Amino acid sequence: MSNTKITVTSPLLPPLEEFTPYLQKIWESKWITNNGHFHRELEKALAEYLGVPYISLFTNGTLPLITALQALNIKGEVITTPYSFVATTHAIWWNGLTPVFVDVDQKSGNMDPAKIEAAISERTTAIMPVHVYGRPCDTAAIDAIAKKRGLKVIYDAAHAFGVTLNGRSLLLEGDISTLSFHATKTYNTIEGGALVCHDEKMKKQIDYLKNFGFADEVTVVGPGINSKMDEVRAAYGLLSLKYIDEAIKKRQKIAYRYRAELAGIKGLSYFEDLPGVRHNYSYFPIFIDEPAYGLSRDELYNKLKEKNIFGRRYFYPLISKFDPYSALPSAAPANLPVAEKLAAEVLCLPIHHELTESDQERIIALIRG
Ligand SMILES: *Cc1c(COP(=O)(O)O)cnc(C)c1O
């Protein structure tokens, strides 16, 4: 068997020869950033593809989270999940707010709505959940709590590109949803991101904030930031969008194959598709119960690594374990038993549009043996 390196993901790169005409157009126009032609085209194309009325492009997936908290004027404490990429909590911290960690649901890895109310204090103003692995949170339950307690909801939907729930974009849940188009994500613009909101007034506000707060040459409406996507990356994104459905189809095939081939292995579990959800198969996490499986998660991780196969332990360590946050009362392991368990058991297997059948066979054989 071959021993070529297999990584957890591989960027969806548009064909280089197809990209050249886009570059030529940008060079000819000399309009290389600040809401240029391709920027406007990509916003239009993404709004249509994703099925959302208002979307604003950003330079990455962290700044829309930071900007969402600014735009909604969030103060005090924000309830969030420790089982995510560290940027989710960083965005709260960068606004001078206090993150409050709530445990997750074992069945999904998403914030457990049953644990939210106990974490609400008189300082709480918002909830920031994450659709982990692109699998929808219990948005109905979260929405009901938010309405009852007068809280805003910002979904970190970095993993949820193209996910729909009963035919409706998941990005329409909550007050604001954000996306990441980083190279490692299902759909990428090398670096990039976006913010989805519900009305024109909010989109305008967001577009001002991502451009230093400028509403016009002489008016600054708020303490803005610079998070404008440039023309080269917007063009790259526009071209890549032509290939995304094909890439997701390949991912789906890989996910189905993993499920078929890993079924019944003692001590190994994984998620199934959910009814009514169009999944994007952005990750394929498996969970290793050491006593039943015979190896610990880390032993399996290293066994694969020795054979040049690089899974990733998303999300280990928990955000609540990192230095800036570990001293928070809500970061105590006793407060987060399910998240602690998932973080100890999870291994995300390679899944991407270029993974071949023989690569996948190598991975499956090692996990079985
Ligand atoms: C990737 C990611 C981000 C950050 O996105 P960047 O584009 O890398 O800034 C935020 N949240 C989650 C859950 C992510 O996976």
Image (cartoon, rainbow, N blue to C red):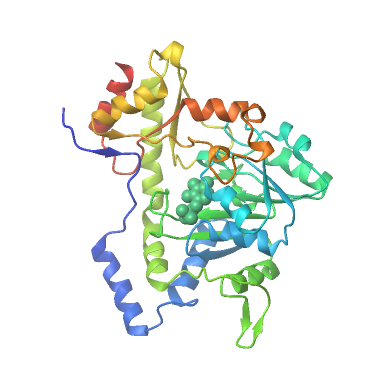
- Count how many numbered circles sit on residues in the image: 0
Residue lying at the far left of the rendered structure: 1
In percent of width and height, residue 152 lies at: 74, 52
Residue ID at (68%, 37%): 330
Q: Is residue 319 left or right of residue 11?
A: right
In percent of width and height, residue 42 lies at: 47, 66
Q: Residue 169, can we see it?
A: no
Q: Residue 181, can we see it?
A: yes
Please identify the quarter of the rendering in which residue 63 is found: bottom right
Residue 363, above or below 281: above
Q: Is residue 161 left or right of residue 293?
A: right
Tell which of 287 and 365 is nearer to you.
287
The quadrant of the rendering that contains the C terminus is: top left
Residue 300, above or below 225: above
Tell which of 321 and 312 is nearer to you.
321
The quadrant of the rendering that contains the N terminus is: top left
Please identify the quarter of the rendering in which residue 296 is found: top left
Residue ID at (51%, 31%): 273
In percent of width and height, residue 150 lies at: 82, 50
Residue ID at (29%, 24%): 303
Residue ID at (46%, 69%): 229
Tell which of 41 and 333 is nearer to you.
333
Q: Is residue 224 left or right of residue 59?
A: right
Residue lying at the far bottom of the rendered structure: 218
